Image (tube, rainbow, N blue to C red):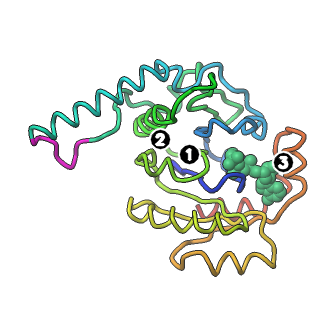
Amino acid sequence: MKEKIFINGRGGCGKSTFISLIAKELSKNNKVLIIDMDEGNLGLNKMLNVDVADTSLMEYYGGRDKIMGEILKVGIKGMVLEKINLKDGAASDSIDILDNMKLSDLPSDYVTWNGNIGFIESGKINDPDEGCACPMGNLTRDFLNHIELQDNEVILVDTSAGIEHIGRGVIESADKLISIVDPSSDAILLANKIGSLSKEASKEYMVILNKIDENTKDLVLEQLDDDISVVGELEYNSHIAQSNLSQKEINLEEVEGEIKEICAKI
Ligand SMILES: Nc1ncnc2c1ncn2[C@@H]1O[C@H](COP(=O)(O)OP(=O)(O)OP(=O)(O)O)[C@@H](O)[C@H]1O
Ligand SMILES: [Mg+2]
């Protein structure tokens, strides 16, 4: 495999759970880097049994104010070019401050590895009035645009709930978007919305059903848009809930068959 995959879906649907399970399965044959874009995800590294680096991506590249300054520069440059009629469709609204990098080049300041699984936090909340997520999204977009994957390398991006990462163009470098859909109308409406946005952005899109059972599955499937590809499902699993509650590493063996099938389709 050689792909950058964004996992999204409504709050609590199981994004971090699936990232952890898929990462564990894929790491048997691939190097898997996880990028945690969700500042509210406090337990993802525990599910994976990886340490968190001292520095987030944003802190390493100068911090919020520096990145905000870069965003302003791009914005002002765009306004000036537009004023003198020089801005064409190719002009980007995104910062472009990083150089091309390979996974093996990434500094241990902001990436931690446990075997084949690497972990990066895009940004952290350090203050009660931290401000908007734009700098983090913009920098993560630039970072992903500059990562040159080799064979048998995968990036999984854990996004915050909702569609902000799509609206802000963070998915520019994505090869694929996957929504996790739990049995709720919000999750279905969001998946249909992300499906149509993915189409507009010419990105491959698929859905995994989570916490589903025989009574809810058909109701979910009949409300998902017809052109959405459903690549797998997982029932509510008490072992998953228990390992989360006790802040333990997630155990792939409990659901290995289902996750293997999903990994073969993504
Ligand atoms: N198939 C499942 N069976 C049982 N519990 C599950 C299952 N999938 C997820 N959970 C539980 O549901 C809760 C939410 O899961 P998770 O943290 O993965 O969701 P999330 O989408 O990442 O949430 P957030 O939007 O807050 O980041 C956790 O307690 C997790 O253990
Ligand atoms: Mg999460």
| N-terminal-most mark, 3 or 2 | 2
Residue flagged by tag 3: what amino acid is it?
Asn
Residue 66 in which image quadrant:
top left
Which residue sits at x=59%, y=75%? 224
Q: Is residue 244 left or right of residue 160?
A: right
Bounds of the magenta segment:
85-91
| Residue 86 in magenta stretch | yes
Which residue sits at x=57%, y=53%? 162
Badge 1 local density, few (<14 within 10 Å), some, or many (20+)? many
Q: Is mark 1 within 8 Å of ligand 2?
A: no
| N-terminal-most mark, 3 or 1 | 1
Helix, strand or loop status at disc 1: strand
Dot 3 and dot 2 residues touching (CB under 8 Å)? no
Which residue sits at x=70%, y=79%? 219
Helix, strand or loop status at disc 2: loop
Q: Where residue 67 sits: x, y (%)?
A: 42, 25
Residue 93 in which image quadrant:
top left
Residue flagged by tag 2: what amino acid is it?
Leu
| N-terminal-most mark, 2 or 1 | 2
Which label number is shown at residue 251?
3
How far apart marks 2 and 1 lie (CA) works out to: 7 Å
How far apart marks 3 and 2 lie (CA) works out to: 27 Å
Residue flagged by tag 1: what amino acid is it?
Val
> Which residue reaches farthest left?
84
Dot 2 and dot 1 residues touching (CB under 8 Å)? yes
Residue that mark 2 sits on: 149
Which residue sits at x=54%, y=76%? 225
Residue that mark 1 sits on: 154
Which label number is shown at residue 12?
none
How far apart marks 3 and 1 lie (CA) works out to: 21 Å
